[in-house]
Image (cartoon, rainbow, N blue to C red):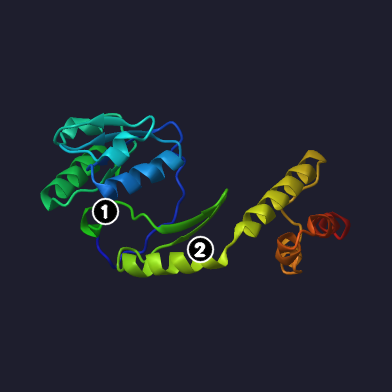
């Protein structure tokens, strides 16, 4: 993948979908964890597989070298080996099969890049350098982790709850002044336990239409 390409950001729904991880070390384990977090059906193939992977519930482990046929039925594949030849083979096989492939720390053998992420419940903030500097992306993720506390998850829950209540009452939520409300100190209200006050502020969105 050329490093000067402009990448298209997307969040994938992988719940229940078969995904393959080629590699069995610590890096592969982190990729497995990310896929499991998204409720994917994960298969790992590698001659040697670390115990931190085999201990994961629901992971299918194949202790052998990768074969092209391992991609059959897969929706996505992540390669996490220290063997450039294996990375290249998996990527080419995936391209031939129309399957999205990522190779850890090997952007030339990637059809997509995994961003660094901070997750707070359903809120996810990501940072990507398009493969130019994973170190910078990780550094920015640490900054986001320090700045985005659990109150953001609480705020998201409140906004989602109110939005569903509006929709159930037949109120369109598309043209409400959500940004105005968010700019009115709502996060600080949630942070300091003033949830009812924040809810009242949201309800005014309907009154002020």
What residue is rendered at 24% in x and 37% in y? 97
- Specify the quadrant of the image occupied by residue 57: top left
Mark 1 is surrounded, within 10 Å at the Cα level, by few (under 14), some (14 to 19) or many (20 or more) other residues, namely some
In the orientation shown, which residue stands out farthest toward the right?
207
Number of numbered discs: 2
Closer mark to the observer between disc 2 and disc 1: 2
- State which quadrant residue 6 falls in: bottom left
Relative image position of residue 30 (x, y in whole percent): 34, 48
Q: Is residue 205 left or right of residue 107?
A: right
Looking at the rendered structure, the secondary structure element under dot 2 is helix
Residue 148 falls left or right of residue 79:
right
Name which residue lies at 19% across and 40% down. 93
Q: CA separation, marks 2 and 1?
A: 22 Å
In depth, the one of 198 and 193 nearer the eye is 193
Q: Which residue is mark 2?
A: 145
- The residue to which callout 1 is attached is 104
Compared to residue 90, the image places residue 191 above or below, namely below
Question: Mark 2 packing: few (<14 Cα in 10 Å), some, or many (20+)?
Answer: some
Expressed as whole percent of the image width and height from the top left, the position of residue 164 reads 73, 43
Q: Is residue 167 above or below residue 120?
A: above
In the figure, residue 99 lies in which quadrant?
Answer: top left
Question: Residue 35, relative to residue 127: is it above or below?
Answer: above
Could you tell me which residue is drawn at 72 percent across and 69 percent down?
A: 183
Q: Is residue 96 left or right of residue 159?
A: left
Residue at 27 percent across and 38 percent down: it is: 51
Would you say residue 98 is visible in this rendering? no
Residue 2 in sight: yes
Q: Position of residue 163 (x, y in %)?
A: 74, 48
Q: Quadrant of the N terminus?
A: bottom left
């Amino acid at each position: 993948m050329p490093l000067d390409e402009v990448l298209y950001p997307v969040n994938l729904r992988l719940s229940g979908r078969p995904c393959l991880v080629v590699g069995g070390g610590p890096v592969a384990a982190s990729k497995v964890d990310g896929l499991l977090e998204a409720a994917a059906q994960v298969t790992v193939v590698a001659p040697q597989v670390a115990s931190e992977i085999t201990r994961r519930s629901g992971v299918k482990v194949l202790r052998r070298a990768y074969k092209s046929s391992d991609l059959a039925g897969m929706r996505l594949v992540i390669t996490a080996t220290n063997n450039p030849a294996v990375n290249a083979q998996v990527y080419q096989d995936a391209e031939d099969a129309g399957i999205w492939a990522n190779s850890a720390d090997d952007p030339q053998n990637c059809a997509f890049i995994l961003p660094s992420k901070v997750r707070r419940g359903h809120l996810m903030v990501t940072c990507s350098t398009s493969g130019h500097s994973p170190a910078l992306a990780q550094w920015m993720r640490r900054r986001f982790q320090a700045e985005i506390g659990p109150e953001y998850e609480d705020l998201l829950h409140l906004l989602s709850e109110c939005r569903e209540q509006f929709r159930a009452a037949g109120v369109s939520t598309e043209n409400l002044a959500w940004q105005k409300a968010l700019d009115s100190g709502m996060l600080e209200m949630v942070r300091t336990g003033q949830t009812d006050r924040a809810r009242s502020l949201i309800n005014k969105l309907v009154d002020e239409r």
